[in-house]
Amino acid sequence: MWPTRINTRLSIEVHRVLHDVAERGDAIGYLSPPARSETDPWLGQTLAAVHAGNAALAVILVEGTIQAIGLWRRSPHALFSRCAEIEKVMAHPSARGLQLGRLIVEALTDHARAAGLETIELRVRGNNHGAIQLYEERGFHEWGRQPNVVEVGNERYDMVHMMLQLGRGPEVVLRGSLPGGPGWSPRR
């Protein structure tokens, strides 16, 4: 499902997934299980971005209950309007092993491509080897790594940056780092 409006059921079930995944200690951006007072505003902001065409929230229901979530969010900068970041990909602990993470990533990738995005990227904690493998199997590759920048108490972990090219139209000119064009300057 691709929710576009907040309602009580969506709010309760998304909170349940975020809370229970964080309670397990999984790397989803919370140091401790969040309260509804944290997850409801996040969901509201996410759905406002969905309504504006700058995000897409995917949820998977198993037997009528949300068991997995994930989203892509377009860059807010005009120069990067065809780029988006995948965020909060997770499955509820009771639904592990059902390949829901894989389904969410595939759905988000297909949706982003259909929305005209050219590049999607994500960040993943360096010790989350299962997620890194899942992303690599879906075609993502690592483009950078910040050593020991994720703080969890007194422990530090790498932040791995990954990306996937979704394709570009034939009219797009790829200049990469070639000299010339707006913003160009010669080496000193």
Image (cartoon, rainbow, N blue to C red):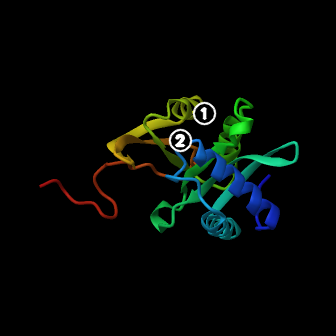
Q: In front here: 1 or 185? A: 1
Residue name at image x 64 percent, y 52 percent: 19
Q: Judge whether residue 3 can be spotted in this image.
A: no
Can you identify the residue that label 1 sits on?
Answer: 138
Q: Percent position (x, y) of residue 133?
A: 54, 29
Residue type, mark 2 in image:
Leu
Q: Are marks 1 and 2 in contact (CB under 8 Å)?
A: yes
Q: Quadrant of the C terminus?
A: bottom left
The answer for how far apart the CA atoms under marks 1 and 2 are is: 9 Å
Residue reaching furthest to the left: 188
Instruction: Tell me the element at label 2.
Output: strand
Residue type, mark 1 in image:
Arg
Relative vertical location of residue 156 with respect to residue 29 in this rendering, above or below: above
Q: Judge whether residue 60 can be spotted in this image.
A: yes
Q: Which mark is residue 164?
A: 2
Mark 2 surroundings: few (<14), some (14-19) or many (≥20) residues within 10 A: some
8 sits left or right of 146 in the view: right
Residue name at image x 64 percent, y 44 percent: 90
Q: In front here: 90 or 121? A: 90
Q: In front here: 90 or 174? A: 90
Name which quarter of the figure residue 146 lies in: top left
Q: Percent position (x, y) of residue 183?
A: 30, 64
107 sits left or right of 168 in the view: right
Residue reaching furthest to the right: 63
Q: Earlier in the sequence, mark 1 or mark 2?
A: 1
